[in-house]
Image (cartoon, rainbow, N blue to C red):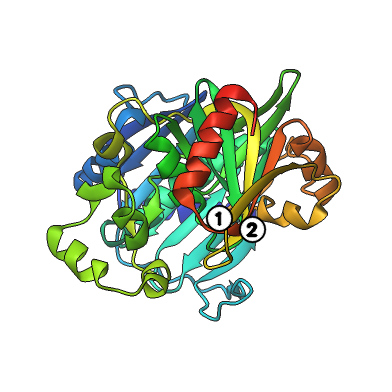
Amino acid sequence: MTKTERKEIIQKYREAYPAVHRMALVFGNCRIRVTANSEHLIDELTTYYGTFVTPDAPDNADIGITVHEAPTPELPERFTVRQPDPGKTKIKEEYLDLANGRIVRKRLTGMIFVFGEGENLAIGPCMENSNQVVNFINNRFIEWELCRGCLLGHAAGVICDGKGLALAGFSGAGKSTLALHIMSRGATFVSNDRLMIEQQDSGLIMYGVAKLPRINPGTILNNPDLASVMTADERRRFSGLPKAELWNLEYKYDAPIDICFGPDRFELDAPMNALAILNWKHGAGPMSVREVRLSERADLLPAFMKSTGLFFTPCDGCGMPEPSAENYAQYLSLCRVLEFSGGVDFKKAAEICVTFLKTGVL
């Protein structure tokens, strides 16, 4: 598909489903303007993003996105299937590369996303899939940060006493659960699952994503601050499950930070003073923690490294460093790194993390 054809597609759907309702977001230094043809969708997005919403929707925003509630468009081009991640079998997405852009189609929902060269459009049954609209908005911000010179990390993030801690781990390690246990000890939330890290003279800066933590029933039942997320009936039902089954449930909840922990507890940038890597397993005995150097522990790097995925298309002059193991190791050499191993113990690990950030001592 040529650049002209892509622009024609964008123009066609913007004219067919005019986006007249506005919302403005401020993510750190990034200003985002979202317009939609559904006022109800804008209201839902405004509630979701909370304190990141600003009254002004400037025409000169850093990122502009239009969202169109409509039947799923029929596109004649042949899409390429995105193969599932290792260990998974379900095909969820397919894509079509354009001149300096891409179209992504979600197979399960029929949502279509078009982006490239500053043009960003989402179309389809948006109200039924507002979570995918949220992800699209956040992915545009991630791309913006990467093009400014950041590396992408697969990690959560918190701030305690002005110091930032990233939390990474291999699949199912519980980085979000640990982040929320640290929140219960007074920390501020930065990000749930993605961090962009930037190298500055003063060290590392981490930038979070304005996405609410997605947590399972086990996380809720083991943290009193999250009690409001689950109904009393759900609490009774999940409390009766065996521990192993409880922690493996795919059932997820959004955890609203302001309701669970109070206002002004969600920020999107912080110094990254330390990285905790969760290399532990349920039932593996006592938990242990030690400080490590990633130059000597290359096996731990994949816990933090993250591919950019389908929703990243480098712009001309993109400043993103090569996402090589060498560059990740070099960036992460600028902060202290802790490895948690042995068995899983969120409460003890949270106490250790808070003490470490406050004193610098394990």
Disc ID at residue 6: 1
* Residue 297 placement (x, y as % from top left): 81, 51
Q: Is residue 218 above or below residue 19?
A: below
* Disc 2 packing (10 Å; few <14; some 14–19; many ≥20): some
The CA span between labels 2 and 1 is 7 Å
Q: Which of 276/10 is in front?
A: 276
Q: Earlier in the sequence, mark 2 or mark 1?
A: 1
- Disc 1 residue type (three-letter): Arg
Residue 128 image offset from top left, x and y in percent: 27, 62
In the picture, the quarter occupied by the N terminus is: bottom right
**Vertical comparison of 284 with 122: above or below:** below
Q: Amino acid at mark 2?
A: Leu
The reply to whether residue 312 is visible in this rendering is no
Q: Relative to residue 362, is residue 279 depicted above or below? A: below
Say which quadrant the C terminus sits in: top right
- Left or right: 28 in relation to 233: right
Q: Residue at x 60, y 32 (%)?
A: 206
Q: CB atoms at circles 2 and 1 under 8 Å apart?
A: yes
The image quarter in which residue 234 lies = bottom left
Residue at the spot x=65%, y=29% of the render? 361
Using the image, tell me which numbered label, if any, was put on residue 98. Answer: 2
Above or below 216: residue 168: above
Q: Nearer the viewer, mark 2 or mark 1?
A: 2
Q: Residues within 10 Å of mark 1 (few under 14, many from 20)?
A: many
Q: Nearer the viewer, residue 103 or 139?
A: 139
Q: Secondary structure at mark 2?
A: strand
- Residue found farthest to the front: 286
Frontmost residue, 21 versus 199: 199
**On the rendered structure, is 242 left or right of 359?**
left
